[in-house]
Amino acid sequence: MVKKSCDSRDERGQVVYSPNQRARTEPTGKRRGGYCVCGPDVKDSYDGPLYDGPICLNLGSTEDKDKDEEEEEEEEEEEEEEEEEEEEEEKEEEEEKKKKKKKKKKKKKKKKKKKKKKKKKKNEELEGRTRRRRRRSISIRRMKRRMG
């Protein structure tokens, strides 16, 4: 970037912005972007990070840029760490859900076993013809269920 003096300052020495750029550079406490109205050549040639606050890009020192780059790298590292932590938490939640499902399946199996035992006892209590009829009707029901 070619350094030159900024000729877009008002009477108080403040850098003048276009309305769109002003909206993006108002002090909000967040990271702000936007460019000084020095000219398109400055905008096109500047490929560094967004600067903070109303400072003309032409007057910025290289030290500030290095600091900004370091800050951005730190922010990126922090974001990556946060993403990793979120992924770990999601994995743990999924594992817990799987464990709960397994427990439910075990409970269902136990219930089925109990039901089978009850049915056996009932069949044993019934005698002769009635037992055969009952078995036959049960098997017919099963067949119908399978057939749809």
Image (tube, rainbow, N blue to C red):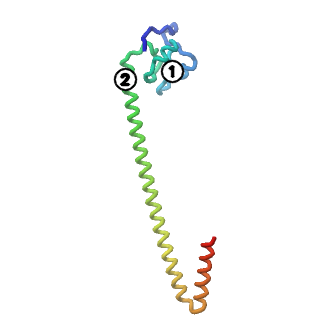
Looking at the image, residue 104 sits to the left or right of residue 137; the answer is left
Mark 1–mark 2 Cα distance, whole angstroms, equals 18 Å
Q: How crowded is mark 2: few (under 14 residues within 10 Å), some or many (20 or more)?
A: few
Q: What residue type is labelled 2?
A: Lys
130 is higher (above) or lower (below) than 44: below
Looking at the image, residue 73 sits to the left or right of residue 126; the answer is left
Where does residue 131 sit, x and y in percent of width and height? 58, 88
For marks 1 and 2, the one nearer the N-term is: 1
Q: Image quadrant of residue 96?
A: bottom left
Task: Return the residue found at the far front.
Answer: 147
| Residue nearer the viewer, 128 or 122 | 128
Q: Are marks 1 and 2 in contact (CB under 8 Å)?
A: no
Residue at the (55%, 22%) spot, across then down: 23
Looking at the image, residue 137 sits to the left or right of residue 66; the answer is right
Q: Image quadrant of residue 76?
A: top left
Residue 117: image tag = none
Q: What residue type is labelled 1?
A: Gly
Label 2 SS: helix
Where does residue 112 sit, x and y in percent of width and height? 50, 74
Label 1 SS: loop
Which residue is disc 2 drawn over? 67
Looking at the image, residue 79 sits to the left or right of residue 17; the answer is left
Residue 34: image tag = 1
Q: Residues within 10 Å of mark 1 (few under 14, many from 20)?
A: many
Where does residue 32 sit, x and y in percent of width and height? 48, 24
